[in-house]
Amino acid sequence: MSPEEEKIEVAEEEEAPVDPIESDDSSDLSGSDPQGEPPVEETPVETPVEEPKVEEAKEETPVETPAEEPKAEGPKVEEPAEEETKAPEPMVELDKHPMRRIVIEKVVVNIGVGEGGEKLIRGEKVIEMVTGRKSARTISNTTNKDLGLRKEMPIGCKVTLRGPDAEKFLKDAFWVKENKLAGYSFDTEGNFSFGIPDYTDFPGMKYDPDIGIFGMDISVVLSRPGKRVSIRRHAKAKIPHTHKVSRGEAKSFLVDRFNVEVVE
């Protein structure tokens, strides 16, 4: 055959119809044939949904505390009980009965110098100027080498005032204190004490360079009629507790009699 006839035969073979059976076999063997077969439907691939990550709680590692060594038990010491703070005693209304009225029994003005000689003499002059009375000397009851004291050595001076003189002196002393008195100055039986830092604070007093500065202690004793039975020599008896002057009654007496403010 000539070369032209061979080309024609090859072209006829290519144009010949394909046997469906053969095409099925070829498709099974070769997989997918693009010619003459319907497109294979691709199934959509579902992308897995990511589940939210749950953070695991971190377990805290317990810190091991070192075990305390047992302490040797010693003798148990009892702790002192806390002192209860007592409320200040309120002022009370005074009784008008003649046997219940409160009076100023005495006022004691004292200056302690701690030694005799010239300093004690100047202290005596101060008391005489302030009270108008001559003072009595106070003596030491014990011997103390550290303080330079011996027994029965004069170390101060004092004056005791009663009646109208005591009341007049108290008015001047309260004027120096600006009519104010601390609540802790009173004791359980109604007596009270306070101090004056300088005698020149009294009305009419002037500073004397020959004397210097002297302060004084003032103690006041309050009582009711009938106290004599506790101090007399014959047929001595005790005073009932209800007849003594209480702290609240002493404060009420000063407020009513001298218009003094008691500062708690």
Image (spheres, rainbow, N blue to C red):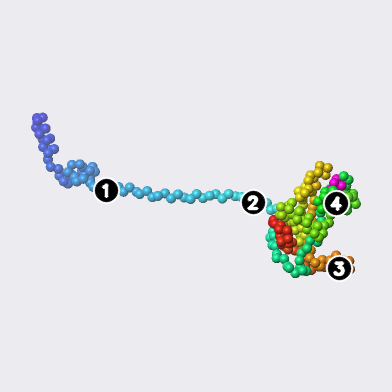
User: What distance separates the C-alpha of mark 3 from that of mark 2?
Assistant: 71 Å
Tag 1: residue type? Thr
Nearer to us in this view, 219 or 4 = 219
Give how far across and how far down residue 42 sits, in percent.
25, 47
Residue ID for mark 4: 157
User: What distance separates the C-alpha of mark 4 from that of mark 3?
Assistant: 31 Å
Task: Classify residue 97 as left or right of residue 124.
Answer: left
Query: Which circle's residue, 4 or 2, is located before the other in the chain?
Result: 2
Tag 2: residue type? Ala
Tell me the tag on residue 67.
Answer: 2
Tag 4: residue type? Cys
User: What distance separates the C-alpha of mark 4 from that of mark 2?
Assistant: 69 Å
Query: Which circle's residue, 3 or 2, is located before the other in the chain?
Result: 2
Q: Quadrant of the C terminus?
A: bottom right
10 Å crowding of disc 1: few (<14), some (14-19), many (20+)? few
Nearer to us in this view, 243 or 46 = 243
Query: Which circle's residue, 1 or 3, is located before the other in the chain?
Result: 1
Labels 4 and 2 touching (C-beta < 8 A):
no
Who's the residue at 10% across and 34% down the image?
8
Say which element carries label 4.
strand
Give the number of marks.
4
Tell me the tag on residue 236.
Answer: 3
Who's the residue at 35% across and 49% down the image?
49
Task: Classify residue 189 as left or right of residue 44.
Answer: right
Give how far across and how far down residue 207 sits, in percent.
79, 44
Task: Classify residue 167 as left or right of residue 4.
Answer: right
Labels 4 and 1 touching (C-beta < 8 A):
no
Tell me the tag on residue 43.
Answer: 1
Task: Classify residue 146 as left or right of residue 54.
Answer: right
Query: Which circle's residue, 4 or 1, is located before the other in the chain?
Result: 1
- Can residue 185 be seen in this snapshot? yes
The span picked out in magenta is 119-123
